[in-house]
Amino acid sequence: MNIEGLGYKIVEILIQKDLIKNIADIYNLTLEDIASLKKNGKKFASNLIESIEKSKGQDLFNVINALGIRQVGIKAAKVLAKKYKTMDNLANASLESLCMVNDVGEITAQNIYEFFRQEQTIDMLNKLKVAGVNMSLKQEEGIDNRFEGKIFVLTGSLSKYTRNEVSDLIEKYGGKTSTSVSKKTHYVLAGEDAGSKLTKAQQLGITILTEEEFENMTK
């Protein structure tokens, strides 16, 4: 949930003290609960309570990611949030529907389907709703989907960006990244010492981009 100040060590202590069992319990913590974790912990507790309150406005994909569903990381969480728009829609999705979601395989789809049919999951979601945690995809004003439906493959060493930065930009504009080149690939962003992926892209007639060309596409 990207709660500033709530690191792994603090979470471990909270679990050990039986103050939390899942993410919903975080929103029932009091100043006294948190202050008891450290000597002179009133300031720390005040700051953490503020961060917890702020986290209620996180976008849907962050909440999905925080649920701890097996094989569902941040990338899959973003895909699911975009597809289903609300937590209720995702929770009620059929197995067949989940299997048809891009980037969600059959095993992951089964994990998601079973997760939302557990009593403890239903209870946790109800508690999150009562706490006022956002359960819907936020619609950004002036959303730009210039790369929607486009698949990018990155290869070679990039000088202006890290690979994570490039992937984030592509996803921001509605595109996707892949680790392998195929006929479905639309662009290959090639840095220095690009190898077999570049060769295969050339053989398939796929558009090759330099970093400068990619940068111009994102302006």
Image (cartoon, helix red, strand yellow):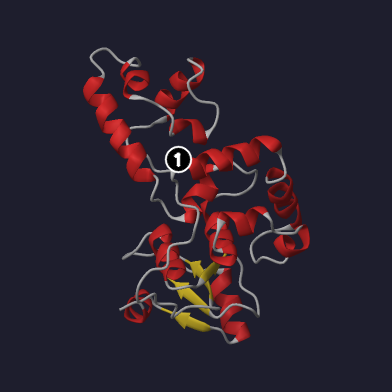
Task: Give the camera-side residue of 109 and 187.
Answer: 109
Residue 29: name its quadrant: top left
Task: Give the camera-side residue of 113 and 106.
Answer: 113
Q: Report the quarter where the N terminus lies.
A: top left
In the image, is 36 to the left or to the right of 146?
left
Residue 49 placement (x, y as % from top left): 32, 32
**Point 48% across, 69% down: residue:** 194
In the image, is 186 to the left or to the right of 105?
left
The residue pinned by badge 1 equals: 131
Residue 55: name its quadrant: top left
Q: Report the quarter where the C terminus lies.
A: bottom left
Would you call the spot at circle 1 few (<14 residues within 10 Å), some (14-19), or many (20 or more)?
some
Residue 137 placement (x, y as % from top left): 48, 61
In the image, is 34 to the left or to the right of 193?
left
Residue at disc 1, secondary structure? helix
Residue 142 placement (x, y as % from top left): 35, 76
